[in-house]
């Protein structure tokens, strides 16, 4: 039995459907990340779990209990907000203890709980300060402390790192992961940052326009995106999505993609590309991640599906750890990820290695993955 | 989605209604005491009410009587003179002072409160001060004579043709500092980079103000106009304290007209009709303004 | 108008600057003139005003006009001075300010943090009520005060002012709470705080500035009101402004200008003190009341 379960959840504001039939479930101790572009409904979904917004239809269960009609304070959840939402007029200690104070927990008990939590988060020295006297990272810790002290069944995080600068964000990300590993509580975490989603999640739910696009482990989402939106949204630089036609010759199938000049580029597909066969003579979208498109020396030697082909390099972007080369296929700009010291010059032609084992194919009409 | 939407709680249905219950008394008070009363007064303007409200329907009779009264025309004419001078002088003076005060003036902290303090005073106090200061017998004229300028004459407040201008003087004194504050806030909101860009284009200070900064003050002009127009239409206390509407009817305004017809001349129907017209005047200024303010506010 | 606002980048030559200072100082004299006239002439004997000029300092200093204005001058038919009316004004202002501020705060809280269908209409109607000419409510209000049995009382006046202040106080608090982070309210909901607990523990402690602005605005407006006072008060419950006007414009006897000036200053004193002590907030209120919804 899943620990947090959401069944056919719908949410309507006036005439606008914000969430259209969401089904999700996560086991106890799981880390569920809700990711998607702004306006996709991920924050609304989180708020409905918290009980901060009503739902139009569907059910939410936490630990086997239906919580649809419960007040936020009765759902046994805690939430860390994007702005941290620390009460400005209270000290750190009062902030952390406020929920217990409302519940009427006696002072000595409150003090002990505050003490324990502040030790875990190393914020003991901040307890007497007001939120305005704290740095961004410290506020973030206090916000987590306020959530931790409730010992909730589920932690909800609403883009908690988006107000931090880049370096601190990476540090806090690691810290949240470490905290999750040691506490083993269930977490639902909203972000628009796909790297955060990949690094933190045990399960990712990708949303767009209030519809769940895909729900799976980070590896599933990354390697087998269920449609072109997920493929494009997850991963940076984004997956190359190249319109191509499938041609059958005597031996098997090959892909053909027009180039800016000269003959179309053709790639022979390896054996067993069975599901593509149906599309022979038609068009597909050929999806290949930049790291599966590299210089021949950098290609994966263990992969049988590597095919070499010469491309016109238009722009070269050295990024330190890698060098990105931009070419043009099927009317689209295509990014290849080369080793940092690969010899390449803009305007020249060079052989690129396409790792077709890692390639995915989409139906141009439905945008769904076909192989 | 700025709302912390109400969560349904099986435990407590009342809790969900509580916010609306808290708002209800205020809203009810406003509905009854503002909108209900407006309807009531509007209704009275179609009745034969004299000393007391009475409900005999007379149609538009009060309005036709009202528009036939020279006294009412006098009040409207005075409002026209007073209102336009008051608005124009306050805006020009306010903008001028704000621009001067915005030149990194050291003593700004001292000067600004001096320009503004009249706004804290009651119009009755203002009226009293100016009434005696402009009184030829003891005020300015008398003082000038004492100083040896025997031919000096300033008798506007006693003069049927000029008394309305003394109301303008006192009202401008009271409100122009406030308009100055509005413009000063507007000037402080001008992006300095725009000014620097204009300076690099070789624009003189005069050009910068005339072509760039003052046109940017458009919203402030609009706000100032709305505030001043609405104060002008409501103006009552100042006239009562300064001239009492006189000499004769020389400084009657719609507000004093309404009061005297309703409460001293026992023509409540006509008084109600004049109040209704005042409301329409103010609404025609305020409603379009608030409408545009609220709709642009929603967009941003 | 905050002091922290950056100065203009416009630069001016030094001759221009001298002219600017002269102009500014000249205007300062213009604004100070009536106050100066009231002050100097309130401490002169009447003869000195009649024979001397209004701008000169007193040759013979006397506080008699002040005492007279405060406790013995003839107001209407009674030689009571302004003292009882000053007290009337205080008794009228304090409850009206307290009630309208409290209601405004609660209304602003509901309208921003507990929104419901139709809340914008409610707010718009309250906002529009700020601008009506009060002439339009005088007749029915007089009747209702009579029905309630509080016609001609200070309580009645207080009620009238409280009601017609709600629009402004709601406007002030709504605009202030609009900028107050809703996430704080949500956090408190998760912490289990109730409607009133959230208001009292989370919003109210952060509302200091807007409370000051609202109280000052309401205090100034109600203290300075004349129309309601003259319409609804009887001769015992007159507020200060009406009493002052009666003192100044009474046509019987000698015109005691010095007493009038002293009385005018007495009537202006409370709002002037508020202005001097907290002018910053006063201006903020003016701006908030003047611009935007």
Image (cartoon, coloured by chain):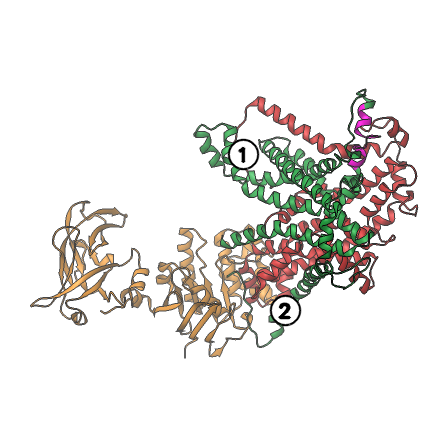
Q: Quadrant of residue A17?
A: bottom left
Q: For this rendering, which residue is in front, B28 or A342?
A: B28
SS type, badge 1: loop
Query: Which span of residues is magenta-colored?
Result: B129-144
- The residue positioned 82% from the left and 57% from the top of the image is B51
Q: Is residue B130 left or right of residue B24?
A: right
Question: Are labels 1 and 2 on one chain?
Answer: no
Q: Position of residue B24 (x, y in %)?
A: 66, 66
Q: Quadrant of residue B137?
A: top right
Q: For this rendering, which residue is in front, A157 or C260?
A: C260
Which residue is disc 1 drawn over? Answer: C8
As displayed, is residue C116 above or below residue C160?
A: below
Q: Main secondary structure of the magenta part?
A: helix
Chain C colour is red
- The residue positioned 82% from the left and 51% from the top of the image is B265
Q: Which chain is orange?
A: A
Residue found at the very far left of the displayed protein: A250
Q: Which chain is green?
A: B
Q: Position of residue A240 (x, y in %)?
A: 25, 58
SS type, badge 2: helix
Residue C229 on the magenta span: no
- Using a 10 Å C-alpha cutoff, classify the residue at mark 2 as few (fewer than 14 neighbours), some (14 to 19) or many (20 or more): some
Which residue is disc 2 drawn over? Answer: B18
């Amino acid at each position: 039995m899943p620990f947090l379960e959401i069944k056919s959840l719908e949410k309507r504001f006036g005439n606008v459907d914000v969430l259209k039939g969401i089904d999700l479930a996560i086991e106890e101790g799981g880390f569920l990340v809700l990711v998607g572009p702004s306006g996709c409904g991920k924050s609304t979904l989180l708020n409905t779990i918290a009980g901060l917004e009503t739902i139009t239809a569907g059910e939410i269960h936490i630990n086997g209990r239906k919580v649809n009609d419960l007040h936020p304070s009765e759902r046994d959840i805690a939430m860390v907000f994007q702005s941290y939402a620390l009460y400005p007029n209270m000290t750190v200690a009062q902030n952390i203890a406020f929920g217990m104070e409302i519940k009427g927990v006696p002072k000595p008990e409150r003090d002990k709980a505050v003490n324990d939590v502040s030790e875990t988060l190393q914020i003991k020295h901040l307890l007497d300060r007001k939120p305005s006297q704290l740095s961004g990272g410290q506020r973030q810790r206090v916000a987590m402390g306020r959530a931790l002290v409730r010992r909730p069944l589920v932690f909800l995080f609403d883009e908690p790192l988006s107000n931090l600068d880049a370096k601190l964000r990476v540090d806090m990300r690691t810290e949240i992961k470490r905290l999750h590993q040691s506490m083993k509580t269930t977490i639902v975490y909203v972000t628009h940052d796909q790297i955060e989603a990949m690094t933190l999640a045990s399960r990712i739910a990708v949303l767009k326009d209030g519809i769940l696009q895909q729900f799976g482990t980070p590896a599933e989402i990354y390697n087998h995106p269920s449609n072109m939106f997920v493929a494009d949204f997850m991963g940076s630089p984004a997956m190359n999505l190249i319109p191509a036609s499938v041609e059958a010759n005597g031996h098997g199938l090959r892909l053909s993609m027009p180039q800016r000049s000269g003959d179309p580029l053709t790639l022979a597909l390896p054996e067993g590309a069975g599901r593509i066969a149906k599309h022979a003579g038609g068009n597909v979208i050929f999806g290949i991640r930049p790291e599966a498109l590299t210089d021949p020396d950098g290609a994966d030697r263990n992969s049988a599906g590597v095919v070499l082909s010469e491309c016109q390099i238009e722009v070269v972007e050295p990024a330190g750890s890698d060098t990105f080369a931009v070419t043009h296929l099927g009317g689209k700009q295509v990014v290849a990820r080369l080793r940092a010291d690969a010899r390449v010059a803009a305007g020249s032609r060079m052989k690129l290695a396409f790792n077709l084992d890692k390639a995915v194919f989409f139906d141009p009409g439905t945008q769904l993955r076909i192989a | 989605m700025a709302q912390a939407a109400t969560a349904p709680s099986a435990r407590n249905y009342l809790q969900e209604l509580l916010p609306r219950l808290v708002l209800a008394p205020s809203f009810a008070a406003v509905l009854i005491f503002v909108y209900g009363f407006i309807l009531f007064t509007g209704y009275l303007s179609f009745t034969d009410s004299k000393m007391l409200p009475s409900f005999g329907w007379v149609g538009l009779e009060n309005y036709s009587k009202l528009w036939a009264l020279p006294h009412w025309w006098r009040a409207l004419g005075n409002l026209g003179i007073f209102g336009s001078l008051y608005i124009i002088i306050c805006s020009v003076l306010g903008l001028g002072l704000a621009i001067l005060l915005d030149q990194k003036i050291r003593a700004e902290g001292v000067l600004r409160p001096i320009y503004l303090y009249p706004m804290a005073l009651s119009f009755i106090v203002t009226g009293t001060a100016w009434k005696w200061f402009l009184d030829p017998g003891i005020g300015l004229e008398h003082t000038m004579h004492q100083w040896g300028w025997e031919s000096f004459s300033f008798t506007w407040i006693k003069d049927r043709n000029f008394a309305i201008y003394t109301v303008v003087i006192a009202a401008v004194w009271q409100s122009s500092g406030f308009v100055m504050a509005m413009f000063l806030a507007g000037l402080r909101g001008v992006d300095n980079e725009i000014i620097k860009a204009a300076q690099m284009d070789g624009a003189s200070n005069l050009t910068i103000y005339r072509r760039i900064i003052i046109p940017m003050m458009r919203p402030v002009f609009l706000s100032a106009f709305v505030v001043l127009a609405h104060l002008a239409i409501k103006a009552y206390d100042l006239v009562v304290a300064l001239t009492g509407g006189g000499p004769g009817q020389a400084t009657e305004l719609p507000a004093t007209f309404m009061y005297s017809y309703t409460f001293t001349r026992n023509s409540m129907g006509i008084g109600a009709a004049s109040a209704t017209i005042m409301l329409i005047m103010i609404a025609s200024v305020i409603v379009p303004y608030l409408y545009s303010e609220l709709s642009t506010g929603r967009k941003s | 108008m905050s002091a922290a606002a950056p100065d203009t980048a416009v630069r001016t030559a030094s001759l221009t600057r001298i002219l600017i200072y002269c102009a500014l100082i000249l205007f300062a004299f213009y604004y100070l003139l009536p106050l100066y006239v009231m002050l100097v002439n309130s401490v002169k004997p009447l003869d000195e005003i009649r024979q001397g000029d209004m701008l000169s300092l007193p040759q013979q200093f006397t506080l008699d006009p002040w005492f007279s204005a405060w406790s013995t001058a003839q107001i209407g038919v009674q030689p009571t001075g302004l003292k009882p009316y000053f007290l009337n004004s205080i008794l009228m202002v304090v409850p009206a300010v307290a009630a309208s501020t409290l209601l405004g705060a609660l209304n602003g809280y509901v309208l921003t943090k507990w929104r419901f269908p139709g809340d914008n209409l409610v707010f718009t109607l309250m906002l529009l009520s700020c601008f009506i000419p009060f002439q339009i409510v005088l007749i029915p209000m007089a009747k209702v005060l009579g029905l309630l049995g509080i016609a001609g009382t200070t309580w009645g006046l207080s009620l009238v002012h409280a009601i017609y202040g709600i629009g402004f106080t709601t406007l002030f608090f709504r605009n202030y709470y609009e900028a107050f982070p809703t996430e704080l309210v949500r956090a408190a909901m998760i912490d289990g705080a109730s409607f009133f607990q959230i208001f009292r523990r989370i919003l109210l402690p952060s509302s200091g500035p807007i409370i000051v602005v609202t109280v000052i605005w309401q205090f100034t407006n109600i203290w300075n009101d004349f129309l309601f006072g003259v319409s609804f008060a009887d001769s015992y419950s007159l507020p200060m402004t009406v009493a002052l006007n009666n003192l100044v414009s009474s046509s019987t006897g000698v015109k005691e200008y010095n007493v009038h000036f002293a009385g005018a200053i007495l009537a202006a004193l409370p709002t002037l003190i508020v202005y001097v002590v907290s002018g910053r907030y006063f201006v903020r209120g003016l701006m908030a009341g003047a611009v935007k919804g």
